[in-house]
Image (cartoon, rainbow, N blue to C red):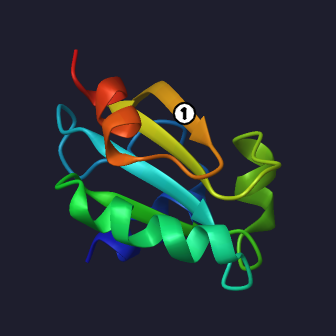
Amino acid sequence: MRWLLLLAVLLIGCDQPVASRPAEPAILAFHADWCSVCQKQKPVWRALGYPVYYVDVDRFPNEASRYGVTVLPTTICFLSGVEVGREVGYAPAEKIERHLRH
């Protein structure tokens, strides 16, 4: 269900609704199947306990460009639909969670 919401957001080009509920923290996770560091990052994303919206940069290159993603993996953290931080490259859970604790 969450990937459908993200797909709708990507296709219509909305700037705001990344999370299913406005006040809910959310993570936009840019990755690629061929990226070995991304494969290492995926279990960390899954274990965080926040909604994670995965964006495969090979399938959605325009979204990677739109968010300024040039390195994989990239983790973008949102609160109330607003970006509050990002991590480029592999990031342990603690670094990602820091952005979402405000």
Tell me the residue at 74%/54% (across/down): 64
Mark 1: give few (<14), some (14-19) or many (20+) Cα within 10 Å.
some
Residue 48, quarter of picture: bottom left
Residue at the limit of the structure toward the top, as seen here: 102
Classify residue 83 as left or right of residue 23.
right
- Amino acid found under the numbered disc labelled 1: Arg
Classify residue 63 as left or right of residue 61.
left
Q: Secondary structure at mark 1?
A: strand
Classify residue 74 as left or right of residue 3.
right
Residue at the limit of the structure toward the bottom, as seen here: 33
Classify residue 2 as left or right of residue 92.
left
Image vertical order of residue 66 relative to residue 85, above or below: below
x%, y% of residue 31?
A: 63, 67
Tell me the residue at 29%/35% (across/down): 97
Image vertical order of residue 42 relative to residue 72, above or below: below
In which quadrant of the rendered image does the N terminus lie?
bottom left
In which quadrant of the rendered image does the C terminus lie?
top left
Residue hosting label 1: 86
Residue 59, quarter of picture: bottom right
Foreground residue among 83 and 5: 83
How many numbered tags mark residues here?
Answer: 1
x%, y% of residue 37?
A: 64, 68
Tell me the residue at 49%/64% (across/down): 41
Residue 66, quarter of picture: top right
Tell me the residue at 51%/57% (across/down): 29
x%, y% of residue 50?
A: 21, 52
